[in-house]
């Protein structure tokens, strides 16, 4: 059974990845906060947890012959204040670099990191929408050092737009709509023509597993939905079927879609669509 060193195991994508593939891989999960993360851990014989605190880690961990390193650790925020800047640097840049620097690189075959399409605001090759997006590109740039030094390791960077699932509890647009609908609260749309590119978490997990299992040239790849979905139209379609409506308030009229073209991930195909899932998700209990 292949061994994976994983960060971000209690995050949205990481937790779902562990749950789906816990019978297929042996996971060594690095956590940064022992007290905060203990309640969210998935318990399984193929999952072992190690805590990383104050830049210290169990040195015996890095004697293990890992096959893969997947970095899903991230601090996401739209804010650009100093407090969040420090968290962004610690989680999105410093933490994965320290771990990668300590790996027994002789045995690692592939390293996978996650970027964001918000690195390409206004459809530029690099125009970060916020500091979070900038940090993703910063990590990718710093990894060039390891790419040059360790030619036996294949490095992959996976980019996408918005993610969702049936049980998503993050402060994202779909969970907010669901929560406000059940609490009879109004949903504020920043833009009346807001169109976003949604991928179900299962499709994202499949993309990661494709990189692990297929012979793919090391590179930065994109996965995206066929559709940029208009949030207002999804709500209108939902409201036509329901006596209880989703209440909305529109703020502004203009919205710029990020639709920068980069290489598509080979072998990957979208299986889930927000247009089909929206009603079921909103109807679900909180």
Image: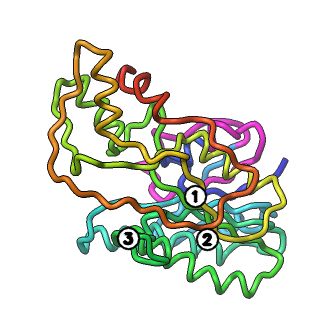
Q: Give the residue number, with chain letter if any, for mark 2.
A: 99
User: In which quadrant of the rendered view does residue 128 lie?
Assistant: bottom left
In the rendered structure, find residue 269 and report the number of the disc placed on it: none
Instruction: In the rendered view, tell whether residue 145 sits above or below residue 44.
Output: below
User: In which quadrant of the rendered view does residue 280 lie?
Assistant: top left
Instruction: In the rendered view, tell whether residue 35 sits above or below residue 264.
Output: above
Q: Is residue 188 left or right of residue 197?
A: left
Residue drawn at x 77%, y 74% as measured from the top left: 105
Q: Are marks 3 and 2 in contact (CB under 8 Å)?
A: no
Disc 3 crowd, CA 10 A, few/some/many (<14, 14-19, 20+)? some
- Earlier in the chain: of badge 2 and badge 1, it is 1
Q: Give the residue number, with chain letter if any, for mark 1.
A: 7
Q: Give the residue number, with chain letter if any, for mark 3.
A: 122
Local SS, label 2: helix
Local SS, label 1: strand
Q: Where residue 174 sits: x, y (%)?
A: 36, 38
Q: Where residue 230 sits: x, y (%)?
A: 36, 42
Instruction: In the rendered view, tell whether residue 279 sits above or below residue 198.
Output: above
In front of the other: 165 or 82: 165
Mark 3 or mark 2, which is nearer to you?
A: 3
Residue drawn at x 80%, y 61% as measured from the top left: 67
In front of the other: 9 or 173: 173
Distance from label 3 to label 2 (Cα)?
33 Å
Q: Are marks 2 and 1 in contact (CB under 8 Å)?
A: yes
Which span is picked out in magenta?
17-46
């Amino acid at each position: 059974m292949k061994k994976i060193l994983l960060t971000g195991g209690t995050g949205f994508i990481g937790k779902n990845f562990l749950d789906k593939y816990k019978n297929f891989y042996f996971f060594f999960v690095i956590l940064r906060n022992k007290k905060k993360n203990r309640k969210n851990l998935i318990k399984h014989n193929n999952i072992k947890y190690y805590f990383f605190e104050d830049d210290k880690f169990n040195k015996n961990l890095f004697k293990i012959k890992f096959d893969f390193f997947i970095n899903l650790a991230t601090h996401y925020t739209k804010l650009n204040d100093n407090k969040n800047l420090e968290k962004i640097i610690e989680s999105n840049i410093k933490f994965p670099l320290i771990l990668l620097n300590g790996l027994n690189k002789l045995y690692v075959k592939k390293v996978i990191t996650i970027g964001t399409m918000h690195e390409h605001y206004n459809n530029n090759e690099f125009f970060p929408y916020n500091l979070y997006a900038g940090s993703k590109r910063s990590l990718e740039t710093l990894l060039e050092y390891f790419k040059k030094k360790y030619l036996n390791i294949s490095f992959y960077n996976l980019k996408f737009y918005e993610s969702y699932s049936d049980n998503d509890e993050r402060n994202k647009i779909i969970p907010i709509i669901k929560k406000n609908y059940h609490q009879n609260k109004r949903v504020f749309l920043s833009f009346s023509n807001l169109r976003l590119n949604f991928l179900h978490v299962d499709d994202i997990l499949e993309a990661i597993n494709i990189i692990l299992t297929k012979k793919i040239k090391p590179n930065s790849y994109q996965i995206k939905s066929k559709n940029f979905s208009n949030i207002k139209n999804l709500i209108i379609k939902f409201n036509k079927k329901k006596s209880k409506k989703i209440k909305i308030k529109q703020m502004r009229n203009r919205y710029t879609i990020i639709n920068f073209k980069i290489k598509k991930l080979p072998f990957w195909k979208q299986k889930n669509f927000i247009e089909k899932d929206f009603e079921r998700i909103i109807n679900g209990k909180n």
